[in-house]
Amino acid sequence: MTLVSAAKHLEHAFPDLPEARIARERCLAPWTVVLVGRRSAGKTTLVNQLADTHLPTGLGGVTSEAQEVSVGDVHLLDTPGIGGRGAIDRLMPLVEDADAVLWVVDGLHPLTLSERRVMRECLRPGTPLAVAVTHLDLVDPEDVDDVLARVSTLASPLGADPILRVDARAGRIPEGLVRPGDTSPARRAKLRRAADAADAALVALGPLALEALRSDARAIWTATVASMRADLEQAIDAGLVHVGATLDRLRGLSVEARSDVSKALVALPSPDDLGPPRIPLPPAPARTLVSEALGSWGGLEGARRVMRAHIAQWLADGHLAIEEWLEGSATLADEVARRARAHAAVAEARSALASRGPRGGDT
Ligand SMILES: Nc1nc2c(ncn2[C@@H]2O[C@H](COP(=O)(O)OP(=O)(O)O)[C@@H](O)[C@H]2O)c(=O)[nH]1
Ligand SMILES: [Mg+2]
């Protein structure tokens, strides 16, 4: 998976997460190619050639501050020349944030010690690095190959590829010079931060809405039935009801309890397609002469037993109804799927970041 598709995955999974959007935007943003090299190597001339601009060059036009110029989806950043004090401090932040670096090397002074030292300090490992060797028209044609060989020997250990001969003032600039691949460590670092933020956001979302809702709903139902049972037990203890009357009372109370529970459940934070659950009422007691007679003979203990059995059954029926109520919600099912996709997207983005070698190629 490319960096960009990893970023898109992340954003798709977290449409509401600004970090994911920012990472995607950064990964799709124009490439920043930073031109570095000694003063008068031909950086600004090269930028003018590539971007069809007229920035001042030569001795009268020494670049004193970094300047950005756009060429299609690439931003070229022209920089002051390496040389003098403070070059590392000036270049480091620019090079660190670069998607690619174009090292402009003056073929008349190919890769001085200070130039190589600055580059070694500033370059992040893995940053695509191309080298353009200029001024070769002023080099004795017999020495050109030696110059290029020297540049190759000294720049290759820093990861330079390709190393091309360029006349900055005329002719076409080879494409490969400013077209970095999908390899920028700066972008990878940004995407890694976005994946971390997405992970943190997933954790902050807490358990799935479904789980929280289920446990809240179960708690409300259990508490309602328990309080009803306590009321009935009180009535039985006070000798107010025998078996038959217990069942009547149970039914009356359960109508109230069911309506209370429905109100409480509908008020829970839940997707809006979740109407009230269909909690059944306890079955109506069979009223026969025999049961009436048994009821009045059963005494308080009999009333308690009957009441407990009915309540236990009703409690279980209610839990079942709540499960069905939750499972029937399309919005909740969507939320469950969305979370699963989000987890998968973060994992994919992470493996896309991990599966590429230091130079960015698939390993
Ligand atoms: N002969 C020759 N002159 C070049 C070449 N590249 C750049 N120059 C000249 O070198 C001078 C310095 O170029 P400039 O772009 O200002 O260098 P910078 O300091 O790296 O930005 C300018 O006068 C350019 O015209 C080249 O390949 N051959
Ligand atoms: Mg310049």
Image (cartoon, rainbow, N blue to C red):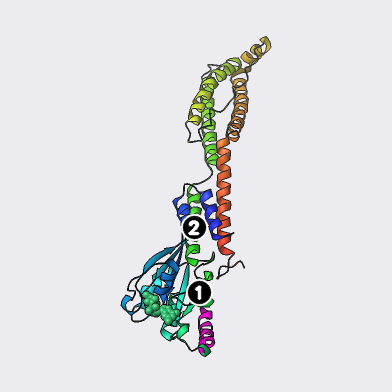
Q: Is residue 41 at all visible to an observer of this figure?
A: no
Can you name the residue that lies furthest to the front here?
171
- Crowding near the residue tagged with mark 2, few <14, some 14–19, many ≥20 C-alpha atoms within 10 Å: some
Magenta span main SS? helix
Tell me what residue is drawn at x 46 percent, y 55 percent.
25
Q: Residue 324, position in %: x, y?
A: 61, 32
First to last magenta residue range:
143-158
- Crowding near the residue tagged with mark 1, few <14, some 14–19, many ≥20 C-alpha atoms within 10 Å: many
Can you name the residue that lies furthest to the left here?
60
Relative to the observer, which residue lies in front, 45 or 304? 45
Residue type at tag 1:
Ala
First in sequence: mark 2 or mark 1? 2
Tell me what residue is drawn at x 44 percent, y 51 percent.
18
Relative to 85, is 344 on the left or the right? right
Residue type at tag 2:
Leu
Q: Residue 150, position in %: x, y?
A: 51, 86
Residue under pointer 1: 130
Q: Which mark is residue 147?
A: none
Residue under pointer 2: 28
